[in-house]
Amino acid sequence: MPAQPPNDRRPRAIAIFLGLMALLLAGATARLGMAKTPPKPPKAAATPDLSTDDLQRSRRLDTYTILAESGASRGENIYFYKCWMCHNQYAKSAPLLKDLFKHESLSSGDPVTDDNVTAKIKEGGAGMPAFRTSLSDADISDLVAYFHSGKCCVEGENPPANPWYRAETQKWPVQYGLTGGATGMIRIASGDSPEGVGVQLIAPNGIRTTVYTNADGKFEFPKMQAGSYILRIPTPVPFKPYRRDSVSINGATKLDDIVLERVADSDNLPATPVLESQLSSAEILWNLPGTAEEKAMLQKNCSGCHSWQQIFRNRYDEHSWSLIVDRMMHFTGTAIAIRNKPMSAPDPEFNILVKFLTRVRGPESKDDPLRVFPRPRGESTRVVVTEYELPQQLLALHDATADGQGNIWFTSHKTRVVGKLDPKTGIVT
């Protein structure tokens, strides 16, 4: 965003909804398990492990730990992303999985047992992708536990509560404006430029405010309510994570310098899931091999409904990719799934996509070292990003829009309700 003159007080905060999304969204979550309240986040270690910050939403999305670390609740998370699109009460192409273990047999005729259900998930079938290379044994075990639970299989009518939504219980005014708050400095141990690094404060009500450093590594937050915050680097790559809990903020508090250490000595980063989960969709696509035609085909056909991260965190064989791409390209609607083009009909774009995805995200594909896009520079660093928590998890937000009073309205895929966010308080109705 371009800088504004000092006397221009027009609000410039960007409200980003990372609800708990299926695709466009993302939703904030914490380690739930069976706990009624979210656990207190651990203190950052002196040399933090790359996977320790459970506040990184993208990592929890990619590992299906939005609701829990293991068990039936995590299985519900996996079901939301992997099963619901075909196995729901509206689709006619696959059986409804509710009360699966009360049935005598599977569609194959085999008895309904843990072993047979597990084998079916792993190996797939003529009309079902094989998940053996996209879901681990632990993933499938949690999914089977969900099938056993009395809760399986919800249609999204009662989304799980989000423990990080605290706007109603923690009355805390949301920041506004651009300046007047905490200030600080980022230094890079290796001597790299500190410009364009995001720095984030998380308020007691769960709302996250992110600002960016200038060419000297300096950053300044808007004026915020005095109190205790979490200070972190929201997207640390290519640096190691940094996080401090219980940071006291009061007006223009001067924060201790933040010193960041590189993950690797060069710009080539290890292609680990932990680092890849921090990359944007465009960065992931940029890092993958492929022709301009292949990548343009993915952009053309897959951008309208969800981000590319959801595609690239999977690895399927060619048969499975063909089923998934067919479902995405050749059907109208979401759950009802009305076929609008036969799978046998000539479709060059379909063939290009299937071959491309099989090559770059097949069972045997290997990733080259990762690189990230350049960080923001100059006027592009003069922006405030505000992220709001939503009351429920496993939402797939669509169609967000603002009204004349500044409220944000949204719909959620799989639910029958409309939501309204008050950006001044963070309260969602």
Image (tube, rainbow, N blue to C red):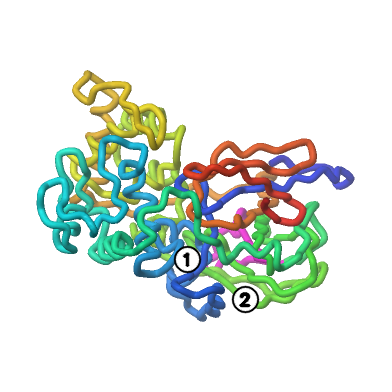
Magenta stretch encompasses residue 46: no
From what the image shows, is residue 64 above or below residue 155? below
From this view, report whether residue 394 is shown above or below residue 294. Answer: below
Q: Mark 2 highlights which residue?
A: 245
Residue at 67% across, 53% down: 428
Question: Bounds of the magenta span?
Answer: 184-203
In this rendering, position of residue 398 left or right of residue 250: left
Which residue is identified by label 1?
262
Instruction: Name the residue: 79% across, 40% down.
Output: 405
Residue 239 spot, x, y in % from top left: 49, 64
At 23% across and 28% down in the image, what residue appears?
351
Amino acid at pointer 2 = Asp
Q: Residue furthest right?
A: 7
In the image: residue 294, left or right of residue 195: left
Residue 70 — which label? none
Question: Where on the picture, by quarter, is residue 298?
Answer: top left
Under mark 1, the amino acid is Arg
C-alpha gap between disc 1 and disc 2:
22 Å
SS under mark 1: loop
Mark 1 near mark 2, Cβ–Cβ under 8 Å?
Answer: no
- Would you call the spot at circle 1 few (<14 residues within 10 Å), some (14-19), or many (20 or more)? some
